[in-house]
Image (cartoon, grey):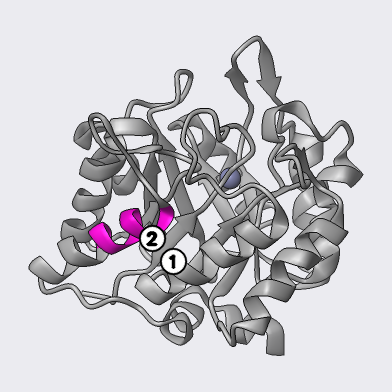
Amino acid sequence: MQPLIINAAVTGGVPTKDQNRNLPYNPEEIGMSAVECWREGASVVHIHARTDDGSPTFRKEYFQRILDVIHAEDCDVVINFSTAWAGGSAKTWEERMEPLALHPEIGSYDAGSLNVGAGVFDNTHPFLEALATRMNELRVKPEIEIFDVGMLGTVNRLVADGHLSADPLFIQFILGLGASAPGTPKQLMHMVEMLPPNAVWSVGAVGAAQLPMNTLAIVLGGHARTGMEDNLRFRRGVDASNPMLVERVRTIADIHNRPIATPTQARDMLGLRQLRKG
Ligand code: ZN
């Protein structure tokens, strides 16, 4: 089995410190949390930026401050910047794509729209084509986030028309949101069976579904996304922290004799070095 890529999604754009004081807010806290996750075994960090008061932002100077912290610690973790809507804080396509100007190795790519609260997390076909074009120009690998089965049909279309490269596809299932597929073994298995053979897949799930979905990925040969973007509790009544969540995934992998990928191994599995050279 391939070494396990642990993806750490450290803050997202929705949770607040009122829900859990361990949540990193400002760029320095987010950068240090990414470094702590890397020390615990994460090879990829999924980064949303926030301003100093914790509000979600897409302005690249905040992403740069996060990178400065990570680089100051000689941390070679793979950087994945979010292009998601973050609670509606980004109003235009250009705002959402602004962090890509810093050339992260990976950018998130949400392969369809979803109802969230009273709003719509909108990822229309024209936006997805524009985002794929921008990522191709900047040689940023799309982390294709799949919330439901129909989004795999969208991905097939985008591969067929040349917007997405299947070399390999990097699929991140995000399950257990209200309007997404539930975070259950049946749902995950169904979608994994639909993937093309060379896809590299990982799964994150919201709340209490995070732990069983991460465990299933370890057993099935997929990869795992953990972190406080998706889950704020270590167990009922116990607040999580990002390093605690990563350490738990690493321990479960160890119990199952699944080695942990280094950032270099993750780059090889995801085709990142070839992308930069090509
Ligand atoms: Zn995210």
Ligand 1 image position (quadrant):
top right
In the rendered structure, find residue 195 and report the number of the disc placed on it: none
Please name the residue that numbered disc 1 is placed on. 37
Residue located at (29% from left, 76% from top): 260
The answer to whether residue 178 is left or right of residue 12 is left
- Who is closer to the viewer here, 120 or 39? 39
When the figure is inspected, residue 12 is found, relative to residue 187, above or below; the finding is below
Report x, y in % for residue 138. 81, 70
Query: In what quadrant of the picture does the C terminus appear?
Result: bottom right
Mark 1 closeness class: few <14, some 14–19, many ≥20 residues within 10 Å: many
- Who is closer to the viewer here, 53 or 136? 53
Report x, y in % for residue 88. 75, 27
Inspect the image, locate mark 1, and give the three-letter code of the amino acid beneath it. Cys
Report x, y in % for residue 261. 35, 78
When the figure is inspected, residue 244 is found, relative to residue 35, above or below; the finding is above
Which residues, given as a range, are shown in magenta? Answer: 242-249
Report x, y in % for residue 272. 59, 79
In the rendered structure, find residue 243 and report the number of the disc placed on it: 2
* Cα–Cα gap, marks 1 and 2: 5 Å
Answer whether labels 1 and 2 touch (C-beta < 8 Å). Answer: yes
